[in-house]
Image (spheres, rainbow, N blue to C red):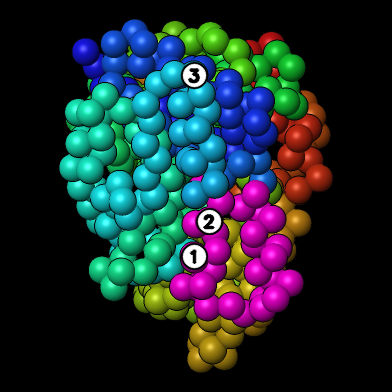
Amino acid sequence: MSLIVQKFGGTSVRDAERVMNVAKIVTDTYAKGNDVVVVVSAQGDFTDVLVDKQEEINPNASRREKDMLLAAGEQISIALLAMAIEKLGYHAVSLLGWQAGFSTSSAHTSARIKNVDPSRIQAAIDKRNIVVVAGFQGISRFGDITTLGRGGSDTSAVAIAAAMNADLCQIYTDVEGVFTADPRKIPNAQKLKEISYDEMLELATMGAQVLNNRSVEMAKKYNIELEVLSSLTRVPGTIVKEKTRMEKMLISGVAKDNEVARISVVGVPNNPGFAFKLFSRLSKKNINVDIILQSIGHDGKKDISFTVAKDRGEEAVEALRGYVDDIGAKEILYDDNVAKVSIVGAGMESHAGVATKMFEALYDAQINIQMISTSEIKTSVLIEAKDADKAVAAIHEKFFG
Ligand code: ASP
Ligand code: MG
């Protein structure tokens, strides 16, 4: 007998029909002799609806109250799913995050899971129940309801799988797995049979929206095998694990991220310590920097450019104002009309010319590259936002066409 954790996202439970469909998948798994723990998100875009309700009343509401509100979405879906399972003739118990043993930090709206004590889940399993757990939520040491940040229920599922040493963690969504590009935009995108944690992590961070990146980090840390698959078609999905056998593929995917902004500090003295001082101002504010480019100095000055997440852009510029004055730099330039397009693949390590092929695709499409960054398994370029879709299509065609 195996223990299987199955997670269903908002689209998979969006209405009564979809909830019954999920109940069918879950009970089929159970009927095959497995123990099943199910993690669910709020129905459809209900979490967004709740955010709108909050903003209507108080845009500056405290984070504690936001969590109290947002956590309600998952309370509805667990109860409905448990009822659907009962209707099919099986025993089910729904549990909120705190009942399921999720202790988190007290950083409301972006809490971190500290510990999962699965004793209550286990007790319910021992009584032959299918256990339905609210994703995305937990409780702080002060006894307050917390949420894990948008998209956090993937992480809830992986955390349960880790805490209970599950045999498999299935993440059900509305796509059939991880594709070489967004299948809604690139018709000949291919479904990957498997992908490594590292590649998946890069893709998740680079804007492929199948899995939340924290969930992949956690799966890697605890070596939990994930399967990403669709709740609408019953076909095998993509397995995410440590090592894969897909050496033949140069890259596993192309992804784009529109939520980036480029900042340049122009006229920085070309002496030691200035980059350190610049970036320490950002790290003090917890602002992550991605691509960094420094020009060759001339006349004792240089320029430092970098990208940050668009929603932290203004804050980053603010944080640097004093710096620019202190060091007598010329100016700060800000541009959020940019997008980052990345290729990811373990094949890059052992094959020369993978990045060149990407640049060639961009040249063929007459798209200008503003910045480039590379790692062992990833090459990213920063381009104008309007070219992003065209770039993804051109690069995908070059590698997979
Ligand atoms: N319902 C939450 C959200 O929409 C959590 C999740 O879906 O993972 O962000
Ligand atoms: Mg959701």
Asked if residue 384 is positioned above or below residue 38 in the image, the reply reads: below
| Depth order, front residue of 92/234 | 92
Q: Quadrant of residue 144?
A: bottom left
- Along the horizontal axis of the image, is 326 left or right of 49? left
Of badges 3 and 2, the one in the foreground is 3
Residue labelled with disc 3: 88
Residue labelled with disc 1: 67
Say if residue 385 shows up in the picture: yes
Q: Quadrant of the N terminus?
A: top left
Of badges 3 and 1, the one in the foreground is 3
- Along the horizontal axis of the image, is 240 left or right of 236? left
Q: Which residue type does callout 1 highlight?
A: Asp
Element at label 3:
loop
The residue located at (67%, 46%) in the rendering is 45
Disc 2: CA contacts within 10 A as few (<14), some (14-19) or many (>=20): some
Q: Which residue type does callout 3 highlight?
A: Leu
Q: What is the x, y in percent for residue 303? A: 58, 68
Tell me which segment is drawn in magenta: 46-74
- Along the horizontal axis of the image, is 368 left or right of 196? right
Q: What is the x, y in percent for residue 189? A: 65, 17
- Along the horizontal axis of the image, is 262 left or right of 250? right
Element at label 2:
helix
Element at label 1:
helix
